[in-house]
Image (cartoon, grey):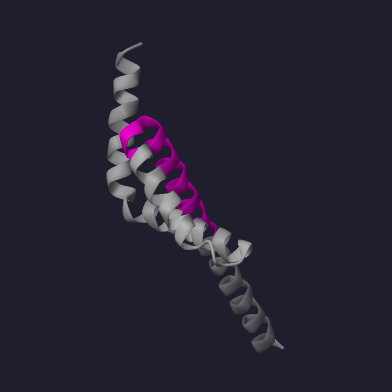
């Protein structure tokens, strides 16, 4: 009986660790997407460039099903945000600082 309780405790600990890891990963992804959105608002030239590239990407996927287009679009945006994560964060902090100083 004691082995069963240790096994259940181990399974519970593993499930708790997995849940914590999944939540942390999801939070990081959402935070990165949020920073990317803010970056595009702070940088209108970059926004226009990324918009044109994204519209070209969507045009390339026009033969795919609507759900495949949506998933490909989401994945493309997520990949750009993750790829630029460090640069975006630094640029956003600088932009926020400039906005604070101009008040």
Q: Residue furthest top?
A: 103
Taking 93 as reference, is 74 above or below it? below
Q: Is residue 32 left or right of residue 65?
A: left
Image coordinates of residue 72 in percent, x first then y, are 50, 62
Q: Main secondary structure of the magenta part?
A: helix
Residue under the point 28% across and 30% down: 94
Taking 80 as reference, is 16 above or below it? below
Image coordinates of residue 51 in percent, x first then y, are 41, 44
Image coordinates of residue 17 in percent, x first then y, are 54, 67
The one nearer the camera, 77 or 20, is: 77
Task: Indicate the quadrant where residue 66 lies.
Answer: bottom right
- In magenta, the rendered stretch is 23-46
Residue under the point 27% across and 45% down: 87
Can residue 25 be seen? Answer: no
Residue under the point 33% across and 41% down: 89
Image coordinates of residue 102 in percent, x first then y, are 31, 13
Q: Residue furthest right?
A: 1
The one nearer the camera, 84 or 64, is: 64
Q: Is residue 31 left or right of residue 3?
A: left
The one nearer the camera, 84 or 45, is: 45
Q: Is residue 64 left or right of residue 4?
A: left
Taking 74 as reference, is 10 above or below it? below
Can residue 22 be seen? Answer: yes
The one nearer the camera, 16 or 65, is: 65
Q: Is residue 26 magenta?
A: yes
Quadrant in which the C terminus is drawn: top left
């Amino acid at each position: 009986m004691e082995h069963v309780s240790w096994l259940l405790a181990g399974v519970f600990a593993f499930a708790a660790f997995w849940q914590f890891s999944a939540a942390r990963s999801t939070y990081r992804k959402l935070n990165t997407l949020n920073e990317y959105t803010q970056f595009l608002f702070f940088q209108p030239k970059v926004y226009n460039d990324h918009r044109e590239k994204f519209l070209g990407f969507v045009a390339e996927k026009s033969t795919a099903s609507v759900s495949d287009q949506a998933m490909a679009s989401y994945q493309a945006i997520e990949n750009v945000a993750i790829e630029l994560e460090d640069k975006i964060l630094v640029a956003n902090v600088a932009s926020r600082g400039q906005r604070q100083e101009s008040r």
